[in-house]
Image: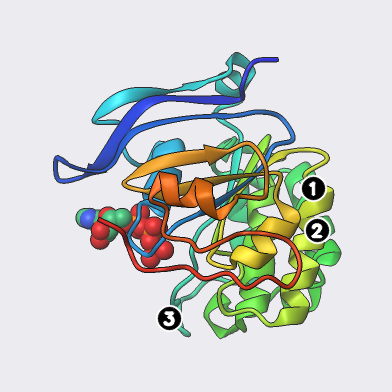
Amino acid sequence: MDALIKIENLSVGYDKQPVLHNVNLEIFENDFLGVIGPNGGGKTTLLKAILGLLKPMKGKIIFREDMRMKKKPIGYLPQVKHIDKNFPITVYEVVRSGSLMKNPKKINTREVKQKVEWLLTEMGVSDIRDKAIGELSGGQMQRVFLCRALLSDPKILILDEPDTFVDNRFEGELYERLKMLNQEMAIVLVSHDVGTISSYVKTIACVNDSLHYHPDNIITQDQLDSYNCPIKIITHGEIPHTVLKRHE
Ligand SMILES: Nc1ncnc2c1ncn2[C@@H]1O[C@H](COP(=O)(O)OP(=O)(O)OP(=O)(O)O)[C@@H](O)[C@H]1O
């Protein structure tokens, strides 16, 4: 089966300065890829390139034909940092705006409205539908952004550190939900929580100037050392793991 997305020799960055060099990666249906690496290593930059928000400086990103036909159906949950408490948009409007990427003309249709209602209920946030987005807790905000990302029935769901600012209970719930969603779509998950990543994802990409792909969710220390990857160890269970500083 062809990859949904094939990244070939990609170099990408800002102001003519590449942050990532010669990245090669394929994402297939039902993949669950964990993306790890140090702060500033280029994880978000990779996601932005996949989303078409940054143009390749070298190399290319090829979308499978059905992905192109459906206008790259990718659901995106961005890194949520700070949203102004008074920013005038409600939870309902944020979720509904998820239809704009796929087909802006559909935003007022019954089909979209019904799907929004269903997602709000499914994700347990229908009671806060009229609240301003800036008033929500971290967990509520992530739920709302997940609803938004799912509105367009994506073939790939991309999440950039969805576990930031959320409590343990929601984190567990979120990963269980992702496991279920993974039966229908490929998932790319950026996280600093190496332990959690290793218990849910199927494969791992270590991103730090370049990308090292591991076709498994367990990496040995030897592999990490040979890749010069700034993670001590990733494994299931009780073995400690640490994300180290950016390597040279
Ligand atoms: N808009 C921008 N303009 C210029 N440089 C940028 C921009 N966004 C990011 N960078 C730089 O690109 C590099 C990679 O940043 P990126 O956000 O991709 O890293 P990251 O691995 O996602 O980090 P983190 O784990 O902290 O989120 C960093 O050195 C960062 O300062």
Q: Quadrant of the N terminus?
A: top right
Question: Pointer 2: what residue?
Answer: 177
Check contact, mark 3 vs mark 1: CB within 8 A: no
| Amino acid type, label 1 | Leu
* Residue nearer the viewer, 105 or 85: 85
Q: Quadrant of residue 214?
A: top right
Residue named by callout 1: 181
* Dot placed on the residue nearer the N-terminal end, 2 or 3: 3
Q: Specify the quadrant of the image occupied by residue 210.
A: top left
Disc 3 is placed on an element classified as loop
**x, y percent for residue 71:** 55, 27
Mark before the other along the chain sequence, 3 or 1 = 3
- Cα distance, mark 2 to mark 1? 6 Å
Q: Quadrant of ligand 1?
A: bottom left
Please identify the quadrant where the C terminus is shown: bottom left
In the rendered image, residue 6, in percent from the top left (x then y), is placed at 51, 24
Q: Secondary structure at mark 1?
A: helix
Q: Can residue 92 be seen in this snapshot?
A: no
Question: Looking at the image, which residue sits at the far left?
Answer: 16
Residue at position x 14%, y 40% from top? 16
Identify the residue under disc 3.
Answer: 84
10 Å neighbourhood of mark 1: few (<14), some, or many (≥20)? some
In the image, is 161 to the left or to the right of 142?
left
Question: In whole angstroms, how far apart are the C-alphas of marks 3 and 1?
Answer: 31 Å
Q: Nearer the viewer, mark 3 or mark 1?
A: 1
Within-10-Å neighbours for mark 3: few <14, some 14–19, many 20+? few
Q: Residues within 10 Å of mark 2 (few under 14, many from 20)?
A: few
In this rendering, the answer to whether 29 lies above or below 117 is: above
Q: Do the residues bearing badges 2 and 1 touch, measured as CB atoms within 8 Å?
A: yes
